[in-house]
Image (cartoon, rainbow, N blue to C red):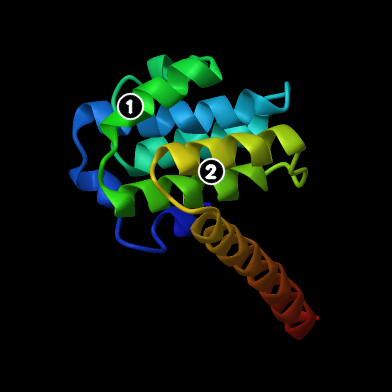
């Protein structure tokens, strides 16, 4: 997982504390969006928070309502940070191998709230999916070479 968090330079590293908090609240809301926040999702969020040197991680893991989250996200003005959030949300949504309608809907609402077009959200989602496929193919290729 940590290689995913380091794929691109992170605009989160230079974000204000309230932007960072909103970013991680969006991830935790997504984890609960389908009604089931599993251990893999929590591990993903916790690892992302550690990679980004977030403090008080336990406090970040408290879910908010969608309305509260959308209001909190108003602090994020940087388009690159907004796209990074959508990227992280798309990756998190695939951690449990079940992309639910509620997760898709929340990602769309967050992206639109942050000023991204549906086309841009879809591009980011497709990039994440392609990357996951490439990682799975690499596992198969390298496992076959080891036998």
Farthest residue toward the bottom?
Answer: 145
Picture residue at 53% right of the left edge, 54% below the top: 121
Picture residue at 55% right of the left edge, 25% below the top: 29
Residue 120 coordinates in the image, percent (x, y): 49, 59
Which quadrant of the figure has residue 142?
bottom right
Query: Which of marks 2 and 1 precedes in the sequence?
Result: 1
In the rendered image, the quadrant that contains the C terminus is bottom right
Answer yes or no: is residue 57 visible: no
**On screen, 118 above or below 45?**
below
Q: Tag 2's secondary structure?
A: helix
Picture residue at 73% right of the left edge, 23% below the top: 36
Q: Tag 1's secondary structure?
A: helix
User: In screen coordinates, is 108 left or right of 4?
Assistant: right
Residue on which the image places disc 2: 89
**On screen, 9 above or below 138?**
above
Decide which of 133, 79 is in the foreground and name it.
Answer: 79
**On screen, 146 above or below 30?**
below
Residue 119 coordinates in the image, percent (x, y): 54, 60
Decide which of 26, 121 is in the foreground and name it.
Answer: 121
Residue 54 coordinates in the image, percent (x, y): 30, 31
Residues at circles 1 and 2 in contact by the CB criterion of under 8 Å: no
Residue on which the image places disc 1: 21
Which quadrant of the figure has residue 69?
top left
Picture residue at 27% right of the left edge, 30% below the top: 75
How far separated are the C-alphas under marks 1 and 2? 14 Å
- Mark 1 packing: few (<14 Cα in 10 Å), some, or many (20+)? many
Decide which of 112, 68 is in the foreground and name it.
Answer: 112
Q: Which mark is residue 43?
A: none
Answer yes or no: is residue 55 visible: yes
- Count of numbered tags: 2
- Mark 2 packing: few (<14 Cα in 10 Å), some, or many (20+)? many
Residue 87 coordinates in the image, percent (x, y): 49, 52
């Amino acid at each position: 997982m940590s290689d995913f968090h380091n794929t691109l330079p992170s605009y989160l590293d230079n974000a204000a504390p309230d932007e960072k908090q909103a970013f991680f609240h969006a991830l935790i809301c997504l984890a609960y969006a389908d009604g089931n926040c599993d251990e893999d999702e929590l591990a993903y969020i916790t690892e992302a928070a550690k990679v980004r040197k977030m403090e008080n991680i336990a406090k970040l893991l408290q879910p908010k309502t969608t309305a509260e989250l959308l209001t909190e996200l108003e602090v994020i003005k940087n388009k690159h940070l907004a796209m990074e959030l959508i990227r992280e949300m798309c990756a998190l949504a695939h951690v449990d191998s079940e992309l639910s309608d509620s997760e898709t809907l929340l990602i769309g609402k967050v992206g639109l709230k942050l000023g991204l077009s549906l086309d841009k959200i879809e591009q980011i989602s497709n990039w994440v999916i392609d990357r996951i496929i490439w990682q799975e193919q690499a596992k198969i290729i390298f496992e076959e070479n080891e036998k």
